[in-house]
Image: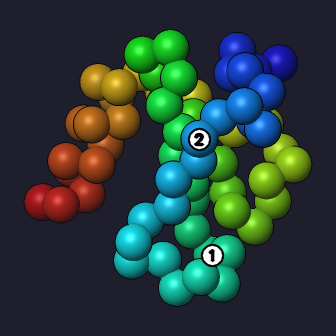
Amino acid sequence: MSDCPAQQALRWRRSSRSTGMNNCVETAPFDRRLAVRDSKDVSRPPLTFSTTAWTSFVTDLKI
């Protein structure tokens, strides 16, 4: 079970580079963590990451 609060209570954000065809991930901050979900299937529980882990992941993508 996810330690993330109800998904409806989170403020989900989608990349500005998204094509609008629901083929991206969405993120939502909560409790010094980040929830990440697949925009194609929002009914599934999101993955959760520490802000440090997520920042490291995104930084490595840019290299």
Label 1 crowd (10 A; few <14 / some 14-19 / many >=20)? few
Residue type of the residue flagged with mark 1? Asn
Which residue is depicted at the point 42% across and 16% down? 32
| Residue under label 1 | 23
Give the x, y percent position of residue 18.
Answer: 48, 77
Q: Is residue 36 visible?
A: no
Please say if 32 is above or below 13: above
Q: Secondary structure at mark 2?
A: loop
**Looking at this view, is 56 or 8 the one in front?**
8
- In the displayed structure, would residue 59 be above or below residue 56? below
Q: Residue at x 65, y 48 (%)?
A: 37
Gap in Å between the C-alphas at discs 1 and 2? Answer: 18 Å
From the top left corner, tell me how far across and down residue 15 is, in percent. 43, 65
Q: Which element is circle 1 on? A: loop
Q: Amino acid at mark 2?
A: Arg
Judged left or right of residue 60, residue 6 is right
Image location of residue 56, percent across then percent down:
24, 36
**Residue of label 2:** 11
